Image (spheres, helix red, strand yellow):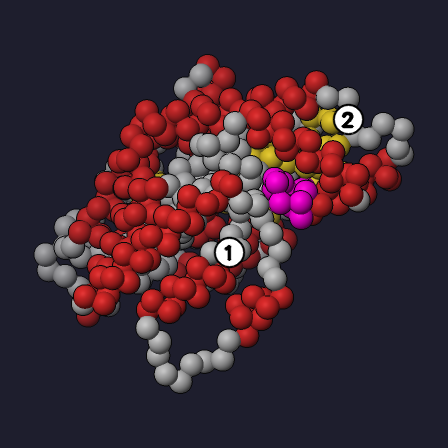
Amino acid sequence: MDDLRRAARLAADTAMDHLAAVPGGPVWQPVAEADRRWLTGQPLPAAGRPVTDLLADVRDHVLAYPMGNGHPRFFGWVNSPPSPAGVLVAPLAAAMNPSCAGGEHGGALLERTAVRWLAELVGFPHPPGAGLLTSGASMATIIALATARQRVVGDVRETGLYGHPPLAVYVSAEGHSCVHKAAELLGLGGRYVRAVPVDRAFRMDIDALRRLIRADQDAGIRPLAVAASAGTVNTGAIDPLGDVVEVAREHGLWFHVDGAYGALGVLADSPDARRAFAGMELADSLALDPHKWLGVPVDAGCVLFRDPAGPRDAFSLVPPYLRESGADELGWFSEYGPEQTRPFRALRVWATIAHLGRDGIAHRVRHGTGLARSLAAMVEAADDFELLAPAITSIVAFRYRPAGRDTGTAEALNEAIPAAVQRRGQAFITGTRLSGAAALRACILHPGTTEADLALLLQEIRAAVRDI
């Protein structure tokens, strides 16, 4: 045990040294060939090695090549730096190593508080039992759509979808691919996922949604659910949630909100935010990812429901060896989703929220949204950039607009810019496509990011163009 204690201290020092060095190092760097061979080609060892040797290997070969999301100039995808509290308690969760399927122990019980806190943060009504932590929004979406399927096809667990008419799911053309994947995995079929066109602000077009529903009804296809976005990955756009819920209720659809990235944006607590998120609290289910804006170390997703009976009807299956006479009326978390063995996610979520508090989280949200507006203003003020969408949350979508170059050249440049910027190591940005054209997007989630970092990002894009 003394050796393990010394190794634990070394592991803590190694982690802290890494975190301290991140802001001063490159945002990202390619993996050297020798290290790539070590990472991917190690033979299975016949004999074990001391933990201190393993820690040295991790320091030299793994920590040396981070994804980059710990750096204040990482603007790629939707990946935040790890919360300090989440980092510190992660070894404690591992030390307990419980399965949080349920039962009378700290890991399972703390999840009740963690889920309730998340619901309170985003203003979602949370009856006890109406939510659980997941690996991320992809699993949360599967659970939500499985619950919707159970409501519409009551015997689906026994007979599957055999003999039933096709079920259609409606999602914004800017919606996340997890909705499409969930429909495929649940046997609904990708053919029946309807991509609803968007307006000029990249929000779901309500008239188009109504037309698609009517066309499916006329064709004998049963509308099942509509999945609205509370902050898309491409632009941060928020679908008109209040209008979507009206359509859903009119046609008896399950109303799901994908708030994986953006739901916490409601904490900006401005008139614009209140208008944009109005209706989110009326969803039948809501997915959100604490490992995004909150920075809870991966993995940490959550799905919330208006009614706990729905997911329990869809998933509850308790074999004799798991029956517990002392269980409360809520049962086990494993009755509300597909996972039986569930990790102790709640400790990282609880610690992060408890460390920041509601005020600290709201400040973090306002910091990100404020910087997004600043970057949007910088883009609009520049002659060589073009803003492509309003900065609603903390994502800015734009493109490089070279003077005197034809459209084809501009397209090729915008496709090449992200990789060129990444290779330079001073900033990290990713690309996407908007309205069929190549675009750049910056997602601002790091609490240490400054306006100077944003100015440097634009400088790095210009420098990268010269390198292309």
Type of amino acid at the residue the image marks with label 1: Ala
Q: Is residue 117 magenta?
A: no
Determine whether the residue tagged by mark 1 lies in a helix, strand or loop. loop
As drawn, is 126 to the left or to the right of 218?
A: left
Question: Residue 148: x, y in percent?
Answer: 43, 47
At horizontal 57% and vertical 45% (from top left) the residue drawn is 26
Residue displayed at 67% across by 30% down: 458
Identify residue type, mark 2: Asp
Residue range of the region highlighted in magenta in the rendering: 421-432
Where residue 293 sits in the image (x, y, percent)? Answer: 44, 36
Q: Position of residue 82 (x, y in %)?
A: 41, 44
Q: Residue at x 44, y 52 (%)?
A: 139
Residue 152 vs 376, above or below: the answer is below
Q: Quadrant of residue 463?
A: top right
Q: Which residue is mark 1?
A: 64
The answer to whether 344 is drawn above or below residue 467 in the figure is: below
Where residue 216 appears, as percent x and y from the top left, is 62, 43
Q: Please report contact status of discs 1 and 2: CB closer than 8 Å, yes or no.
A: no
Specify whether 146 is left or right of 191: left
Residue sticking out furthest to the top = 271
Residue 291 in sight from this viewpoint: no
- Tell me the quadrant of the picture where the C terminus can be found: top right
Q: Nearer the viewer, residue 348 or 241?
A: 348
Counting labels gives: 2
Compare marks 1 and 2 and give the one earlier in the sequence: 1
Q: Mark 1 or mark 2: which is in front?
A: 1
Tell me the number on the disc at residue 384. Answer: 2
